[in-house]
Amino acid sequence: MTETRMSRMARRAVLAGILLLASPAAAQRKAPLVLAAASLQESLGAAADAWARAGHPRPVISFAASSALARQVQAGAAADLFVSADQDWMDVLQRGGLIVPATRATLVGNRLVVVAAKSNPVRVPLAAKPLARVLAAGPLAMADTGAVPAGRYGKAAFQTLGAWPLVKPRVVEAESVRAALALVERGAAPLGIVYATDVRAAPGLRVAGVFPARTHPPITYPIARLKASTNPEGEAFRRYLVSASGRAIFRRYGFLTP
């Protein structure tokens, strides 16, 4: 093989390598960071797995109470997306100029339930006096009723039923809805107020009562891109989540979709 031919082949190899490195498929992409309500752990994790299988970097997801996550954003947390368990905390961030309003959308919905151990035969009557008698058996686990969406939905439901003054002394508040669920799982409280989808994550528990939708504000999960985000993968993942394919994953986990 002549030296000239070898030089041409070497140049072609170098050029091919440059083109490969410059192609979108081979470019180094950064995984987006998502701040999401604790009740989305299994469903959003499954959506992130599906997104990764499609060739994207798997999103990094931080789960906690929506109130805690919103405060992290207010404090300057570097993240790309925020998914709240209520509209109120998203409103707070929008008023503060911390989200891109055009990207805000309602992702999914949920139902509010009373949960108990499968070994506990109690059925919860959702009327003030009978409810108070049931709760007299022990504490009621709820997420923080002053800040966490699940706790606020629960408090609103009891107020609508005229039962909050009777229920309030029995409430043990937890930092998130999953922490309230854990109290019932461990037997620290015989009953808890959680979302219907949370029960799927606790095989030893069952639904002992369902709050009528009229008793509390609609349970909806808004999603939006944070204004500080500079990662295009964040917006791409957001679009996937609100697509028909993305929402189908949440339906499999029991969420309601708009």
Image: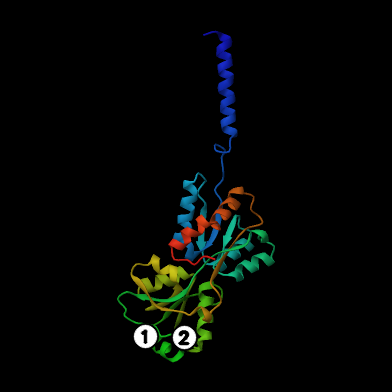
The residue at 45%/88% (across/down) is 127
Please state if 180 lies on the left or on the right of 231 as rendered: left
Q: How is the image coloured?
A: rainbow
**What residue is pinned by disc 2?**
167
Q: Position of residue 209 (x, y in %)?
A: 41, 79
Residue 3, image quadrant:
top right
* Image quarter of the C terminus: bottom right
How many angstroms separate mark 2 from mark 1 (CA)? 12 Å
**What residue is pinned by disc 1?**
137
Q: Residue furthest top?
A: 2
Q: Position of residue 139 (x, y in %)?
A: 41, 81
Q: Indicate the amino acid at tag 1.
A: Ala
Q: Residue furthest left?
A: 119
Q: Indicate the amino acid at tag 2.
A: Val
The residue at 46%/56% (across/down) is 45
Residue 221, image quadrant:
bottom right
Please state if 66 lies on the left or on the right of 134 as rendered: right
The residue at 50%/61% (across/down) is 63
Identify the secondary structure beneath mark 1.
loop
Contact, CB < 8 Å: mark 2 with mark 1? no
Closer to the camera, 258 or 216?
258
